[in-house]
Amino acid sequence: MTILAIVSTFLVAVLIAKPTGIYLAAAFNYQSTKLDKVFGPFEKLLYKLGGIKQTNQTWKQYALSAVLANAFMIALVYVVFRVQGVLPLNPSHIPGMDPTLAFNTAISFMTNTNLQHYSGESGLSYLSQMIGIMFMMFAAPGTALAVCIAFVRGLAGKKMGNFYVDLIRSITRVLLPIAFVTGFIFIALGVPQTLEPTVTAKTIEGAEQSIARGPVAAFLSIKELGNNGGGFFGVNSAHPFENPNAVSNTLQILLMLLLPMALPFTYGKMVGNLKQGRVLFVSMAMMFVVMTGITLTAEQQGNPVLNHMGMDHEQGNMEGKEVRFGIGQSALYAVVTTASETGAVNTMHDTLTPSGGMITLSNMLLNTVFGGVGAGFINVIMYAMIAVFLSGLMVGRTPEFLGKKIEGKEMKLIAVTLLIQPLLILGASAIALYTPLGYEAISNSGFHGITQVVYEYTSSAANNGSGFEGLGDATPFWNISTGIVMYVGRFFGLVTMLAVAGSLAAKKLVPETAGTFRTDTTLFGVILIGTIFIVGALTFFPTLVLGPVAEHLTL
């Protein structure tokens, strides 16, 4: 029954991926479409109010606009967090945030990471949740989607477009309509949507219990759709108000997968090669299936020591999991949330088996098993270019991608982009494990403690935001260090890959010959998967050996 539920959920996601991808291509087509009649008037009003001129930008102008706009929004929301104690819509009288925590939170949500070093229901007022957190939950994925579309336009040899126009279209034509509809569905499923304060209830024993609530449904829909992942409540989607039943759990999974799974089809449509889009989709889907299979098997087997004693074989590893979801839906959710770089959790990842924890960590390290909105797909294309380059070297031919030669300039930019993530993750982890400010936060010594630290910085650099938990990260050291890792991990790769697209866009098409290596075949899909695991996974293999692999061997 568990397998059937997982397979059916994945099949539904696959079925809606292609039409969504075609819709995205139409939404970002600057030519007149039927969509203009619905969204055009509202968008024109926003352009007028913002003084936005719908002129094409170079890749440098596009990248600068994205970085500066996001920096301004980070500063704006930082101020809101700091002074929330004196602002309205604060019925629980929550004080202003600590400076380093506000710094971390503002960067976290504006980089689509949503790493939370605070407890959702007690750390922010309703005003901060709505005009701070929810605002960034639209702006952050909107930014990534806009940059991804500009990147694809560059690969197709078209003009980059305009960042502000693409950002507005991302919100008005994609994020807002879908989030609006699914928000009402979540309300119907029992998710609260209110501005009333925390309610006090009496328990059966006669004690008083404070029950937090708020505008949760609106928060939840964009949280999952935009691959944001931050929780309105401290325990995220393990909370019954944020994820009340199996239906809401399935809907959350589908929302997390919707845009990442649709982008390969958007890409195929925009570059005029639907077959190549399908090859990319199937390659990512195969990796996703493997990751899900390993995690599900590991969690169902549970702790090998207890299994050997005959104590745990029947129920598997239920530690840290909600009974209403069980092992199957918990394992699937853990894979989906790290594969899509969402970061929402319905189970505590710290309690996963070493093998299950390694898969969630590997999904973030690779950031190509569908990946997050926009940024993940850009990583997939980066690995596709590396695969083409390596294949070209093996046959002694200048590599070509979409009819453009990939030369030294592009490969230098790709190499720098490829190196920035291990430098951020391994460098920051080394500092944290070396200094008392870092290692004193570890709650579990030994191999598991290493995984806690590496997971925290991997989640930050990959803009995932899920926590391994058990780590005392609500300190200035962790707030500042993860804030820096999140910001650099987000924008460095977006800018460098825009530069690659801009460089390729300026090149002339090379006529296809018998020696051209086609990138829309099954062979290329196999080479792409191999490149991702050889180049991507082996970079972090020693770290995985010191953490989850070593922990598994000691059980």
Image (cartoon, grey):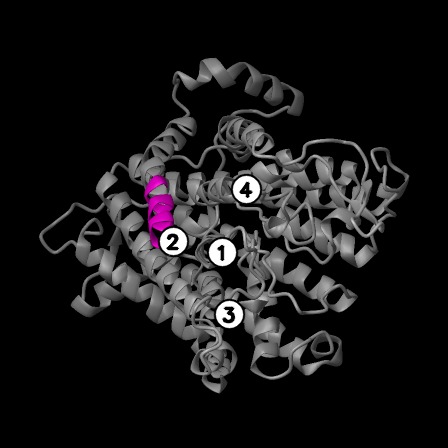
Residue range of the region highlighted in magenta in the rendering:
1-12
Viewer can see residue 156: no
First reached walking from the N terminus: tag 3 or tag 4: 4
Question: Does 350 sit left or right of 509 as displayed?
Answer: right
The answer to whether 452 is drawn above or below residue 328 in the figure is below
Name the residue rendered at 74%, 54% in the picture: 119
Q: Name the spot of residue 555 as percent of width and height, x first.
A: 49, 83
Return the residue nearer the eye: 326 or 48: 326
Query: What's under tag 2, amino acid-wise?
Result: Thr
- Dot 1 lies on which element? helix
Return the residue nearer the eye: 26 or 283: 283
Q: Nearer the viewer, mark 2 or mark 3?
A: 2
Query: What's under tag 3, amino acid-wise?
Result: Pro
Which disc number belongs to residue 422? 3
Distance between the alpha carbons at the discs numbered 4 and 2: 32 Å
Q: Nearer the viewer, mark 4 or mark 1?
A: 1
Disc 2 target residue = 2
Distance between the alpha carbons at the discs numbered 3 and 4: 23 Å
Q: Name the spot of residue 471 as percent of width and height, x first.
A: 68, 69
First reached walking from the N terminus: tag 1 or tag 3: 1
The crowd level at tag 3 (other Cα within 10 Å; few <14, some 14-19, many 20+) is some
- Dot 4 lies on which element? helix
Disc 1 target residue = 326
Name the residue rendered at 43%, 62% in the picture: 366
Distance between the alpha carbons at the discs numbered 1 and 3: 34 Å
Disc 4 target residue = 141
Query: What's under tag 4, amino acid-wise?
Result: Pro
Q: Residue furthest left?
A: 514
Q: Name the quadrant containing residue 447.
A: bottom right
